[in-house]
């Protein structure tokens, strides 16, 4: 592989990466908004961006047409693994958030049931 081909492929890799997003923002949003709406909105946007990058990186790696792996391929593979890890991390954070929201909803439902029973007793029905 010549230097011009390597440079072309590296430029394609760099173009596939921009713009990037910070996965940590979704986790930080949980502390700011206990309802989870902001975290889910941010995380969904981040997962979409990461999946776009994963698709682009996979396309770049698949474009080698049987040629041996070089430094650009290795860099793309490392970035692909990092993006897959970020998708996994963000998805787990969303799952944890959903679990806490369900637990909170269950507690609210149980409290409402107790309140209804109290009201029924007080009304003499």
Image (spheres, grey):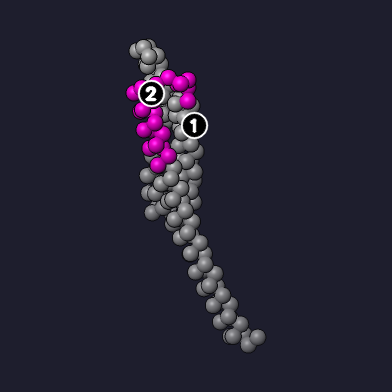
Q: Position of residue 3 (x, y in %)?
A: 34, 12
Is residue 73 a member of the stretch shown in magenta? yes
Residue lying at 44% horizontally and 50% vertically, measured from the top left: 92
What residue range appears in magenta? 62-85
Q: Position of residue 95 (x, y in %)?
A: 47, 53
Q: Is residue 14 visible?
A: no
Question: Which residue matches tag 2?
Answer: 69
Q: Position of residue 62 (x, y in %)?
A: 47, 25
Quadrant that contains the C terminus:
bottom right
Is residue 9 a member of the stretch shown in magenta? no
Question: Real-space Cα distance between discs 2 and 1?
Answer: 19 Å
Q: Is residue 51 above or below residue 60?
A: below
In the image, is 99 to the left or to the right of 3?
Answer: right
In the image, is 19 to the left or to the right of 71?
Answer: right
Residue lying at 39% horizontally and 49% vertically, measured from the top left: 27
Q: Is residue 62 visible?
A: yes
Q: Nearer the viewer, residue 50 or 5?
A: 5
So how many labels did they put on this image?
2
Say whether disc 2 or disc 1 marks the residue closer to the N-terminus.
1
State the predominant SS element of the stretch in magenta: helix
Residue lying at 58% horizontally and 85% vertically, measured from the top left: 122
Residue lying at 49% horizontally and 31% vertically, measured from the top left: 55
Q: Nearer the viewer, residue 67 or 63?
A: 67
Which residue ends up furthest to the bottom in the rendered image?
124
Question: Which residue matches tag 1?
Answer: 55
Q: Is residue 48 above or below residue 62?
A: below
Q: Residues within 10 Å of mark 1 (few under 14, many from 20)?
A: some
Q: Residues within 10 Å of mark 2 (few under 14, many from 20)?
A: few
For discs 2 and 1, the disc positioned in front in the rendered view? 2
Q: Nearer the viewer, residue 21 or 112?
A: 21
Secondary structure of the residue carrying numbered label 1 = helix
Q: Is residue 93 above or below residue 3?
A: below
């Amino acid at each position: 592989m010549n230097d011009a081909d390597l440079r072309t492929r590296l430029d394609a890799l760099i173009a596939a990466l921009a713009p990037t997003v910070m996965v940590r923002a979704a986790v930080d949003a949980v502390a700011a908004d206990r309802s989870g709406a902001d975290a889910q909105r941010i995380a969904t946007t981040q997962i979409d961006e990461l999946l776009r990058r994963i698709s682009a990186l996979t396309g770049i790696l698949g474009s080698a047409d049987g040629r041996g792996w070089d430094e650009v391929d290795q860099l793309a593979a490392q970035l692909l693994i990092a993006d897959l890890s970020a998708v996994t991390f963000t998805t787990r954070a969303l799952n944890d958030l959903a679990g806490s929201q369900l637990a909170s909803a269950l507690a609210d439902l149980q409290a409402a049931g107790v309140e209804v029973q109290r009201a029924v007793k007080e009304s003499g029905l």
